[in-house]
Each structure stands twice: as structure tokens, then as C-alpha cells.
Image (cartoon, rainbow, N blue to C red):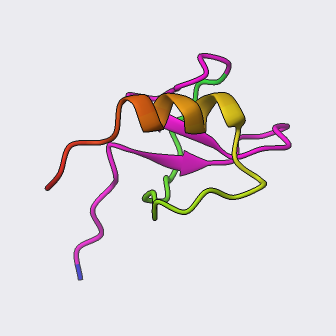
Amino acid sequence: MVIKKLAEGWAQPGDSKRFHYFRESRSLCMAWLFTGSLEADDGKPSSSDCKKCRKALYKNPPPKP
């Protein structure tokens, strides 16, 4: 079984109270750096999401595979 590391996705870094969306290790809200495991976006907003990251993701969605 091969596990592919995602290039972008959601994560809750260290002391953050919210989940942030990361591209190239930088959150879309520009407040966090993160190099850990990411979860793919399912397209469903959550109350745990960073509002700035979610808004930026709507404006610039990930490329379709």
C-alpha cells in the first residue's frame, strides 16, 4: 500500500483553535506554516474551519485531478 502525501489540504497546527488550508506549507490566511499530514477538502464548510482560509479557497479552488 502506497500512501501519497497531499500537496494541499486542511490541518490543525499546534496551538491553533481552527483548521487551516495549506498550500506549499503556508496557510491561505498567511498566519501559519505547517509540514505535517493534510486532509483533502471535501467541499463542506465546517465551523472548525478558519474563515479566511475557507474564503480564499472559494476564490482559488484546488486544480481538478
Residue 10 in magenta stretch: yes
Note whether residue 48 is visible.
yes
The image shows residue 35 at horizontal and vertical percentages of 50, 37
Q: Who is closer to the viewer here, 6 or 2?
A: 6
Q: Is residue 51 left or right of residue 14?
A: left
The correct choice, above or below, for 8 with respect to 31 in the image is below
Residue 20 in magenta stretch: yes
Q: How many marks?
A: 0
Q: Is residue 37 left or right of residue 45?
A: left
Residue drawn 78% across and 55% down? 47
Residue drawn 33% across and 55% down? 5
The quadrant where residue 51 appears: top right
The correct choice, above or below, for 39 with respect to 62 in the image is below
Decide whether the magenta segment is chiefly helix, strand or loop.
loop
Q: Who is closer to the viewer here, 47 or 20?
A: 47
The image shows residue 27 at horizontal and vertical percentages of 55, 27
Note whether residue 23 is visible.
no
Which range of residues does the magenta coloring cover?
2-31
Residue drawn 54% across and 39% down? 21
Farthest top residue in view: 30
Query: In what quadrant of the picture does the N terminus appear?
Result: bottom left
The correct choice, above or below, for 18 with respect to 46 in the image is above
